[in-house]
Amino acid sequence: MDKKARIGIDVTSALTQGAGIGRYTRELVKAVVAEESGHTFRLFSARLVNDPPVPNPLPNAPNVVYRPAPLDEQWLYRLWYRLRLPLPVQWVTGELDLFHSPDFVLPPVNGRIPTLLTVHDLSFIHYPHVFPKPLVDYLNRVVPWSVRRATHILADSASTRDDLMRLWGVPEEKITVLYCGVSPRYQPVRDAEQLTAVRQKYALGDLPFVLSVGTVQPRKNYKMLIRAFKGVAEKLPHALYIAGGTGWMHDEILAEIENQGLNGRVRFL
């Protein structure tokens, strides 16, 4: 985009989700705002009903304007995706030259401006049993509709691109595979004092351990991890530590620990 553009981005996930797509959106916005592009960014979100999951989730810069809607996420989604009310996002953001939705669904957009939609995966089609049924029904109804309307789609992986083409007939030229970046702060820690402090903070002890990071819900396949760890625990002194917030349908994961007799060997941090 050569001219200085007014770019809208839906940052609702950045303000409501601590991990996953929330982190993706926060890092994306931070990176594009930092570019000396001359563009202005109008960050849109549903009205918040809770405090953000992390401090300072959005960048504060001269080229950034935050425009929250007067309605919360539940009401906006009812109007846009259940009733299909054609209330354009510009009702909140003002005039735009480009709009990006980084979380599967694309709200109504006025005019003929280009729109960009990120589709992270189609796991709700491949593995519907690991999602709550109302969520599966919602995604099956709204995501294909959003994909059809978007000018271009970003896919996190070649696998997701192939799924979009095979399952929904999306033309290959409409999809760009854009892998998720990794912040420089994610690197091995070699400072002995820091390592000792973390072990003490989380009571990790001195024995080796296996660490898994991710929201505690069935789609992360924790039940399979716990079953696999059973064989490790029978031969080695390792512990299994799981770091992540509690998600939907997590009770069956807790039950699997009990079933495998691994109480005390599997811990949630």
Image (cartoon, rainbow, N blue to C red):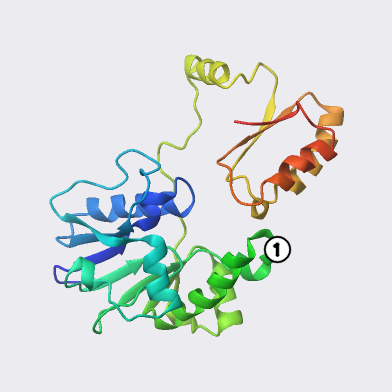
Q: Residues within 10 Å of mark 1 (few under 14, many from 20)?
A: few
Q: Quadrant of the N terminus?
A: bottom left
Q: Nearer the viewer, residue 191 or 113?
A: 113
| Left or right placement of residue 24 versus residue 231 in this view | left
201 in relation to 12, above or below: above
Instruction: Tell me if residue 267 comes above or below residue 222 in the rendering.
Output: above
Give the residue displayed 23% in from the left and 83% down from the top: 111
> Relative to residue 269, is residue 251 depicted above or below?
below
What x and y, as percent, mark residue 162?
58, 74
Residue 200 falls left or right of residue 93: right
Residue 35 coordinates in the image, percent (x, y): 23, 54
Q: Taking the image as drawn, is residue 28 in sight?
A: yes
Image position, residue 121 (x, y; %): 55, 65
Rendered residue at 49%/74% (across/down)? 143
Mark 1 residue element = helix
In the image, is 64 to the left or to the right of 137?
Answer: left
Give the residue pinned by disc 1.
129
Q: Is residue 50 left or right of residue 268?
A: left
Say which of 188 and 236 sits in front: 236
Does residue 127 appear in the picture of this structure?
A: no
| Residue at left offset 33%, top offset 52% | 48
Q: Quadrant of residue 95?
A: bottom left
| Number of dots carrying numbers | 1
**Residue 127 percent across, percent down from the top left:** 68, 65
Q: Quadrant of the C terminus?
A: top right
**Residue type at mark 1?**
His
Return the residue nearer the eye: 262 or 180: 262
